[in-house]
Amino acid sequence: MDSKESLLDEIKRLMDELMRESGMEVFGEVHVKIADIEDLALIKGNDIYFSTKVKELPRDVLKYIIAHELAHLIVKRHAFKFWEVVRNMCPDYEKGMNKLSEILRRR
Ligand SMILES: [Zn+2]
């Protein structure tokens, strides 16, 4: 199994976990892809793309990124409701978010 495949498996597993734990439901099927993109993740319709770069991130940071992208399936903008959806999926998301900004600052 190549590293792209195992990364995709890990992301899908975390995604299922987040959705199951929060009882979140999205309309239609969500497709996840690994791509060589500049951003860590981006969303197009129901397709979520993750950069190969997320491979190096700690698990709680990756979990936050996944929750963030999933929440965009429900709320497009970073409004109050958006962060409510993120928190519902990942109650300690702020830890992952802060860790991520710390990592990005150090780059
Ligand atoms: Zn966002």
Image (spheres, grey):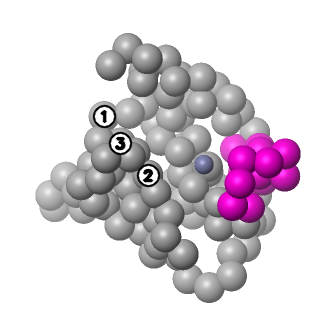
> Can residue 20 be seen from the camera position used here?
no
**Mark linked to residue 54:** 3
Residue at (65, 67) in percent of width and height: 73
User: Which image quadrant for residue 31?
Assistant: bottom left
Q: In the displayed structure, would residue 46 be above or below residue 58?
A: below
**Mark linked to residue 39:** none
Distance CA(mark 3)–CA(mark 2): 8 Å
Q: Nearer the viewer, mark 2 or mark 1?
A: 2
**Mark linked to residue 41:** 2
Residue at (38, 14) in percent of width and height: 106
Which portion, as a residue range, is magenta? 75-90
Identity of the residue furthest to the bottom in this view: 28
Q: Main secondary structure of the magenta part?
A: helix
| 40 part of magenta stretch | no
User: Which image quadrant for residue 34?
Assistant: bottom left
Callout 2 amino acid: Ala
Which comes before the other along the chain, label 2 or label 1? 2
Q: Is mark 3 within 8 Å of ligand 1?
A: no
Callout 1 amino acid: Glu
Q: Nearer the viewer, mark 3 or mark 2?
A: 2
Work out which quarter of the rendered image holds the N terminus and state it.
bottom left
- Is the C-beta separation of discs 3 and 1 under 8 Å? yes
SS state under label 2? strand
Residue on which disc 1 sits: 56
Front in this rendered view, residue 45 or 34: 45
Q: In the displayed structure, would residue 51 be above or below residue 32?
A: above
Callout 3 amino acid: Val
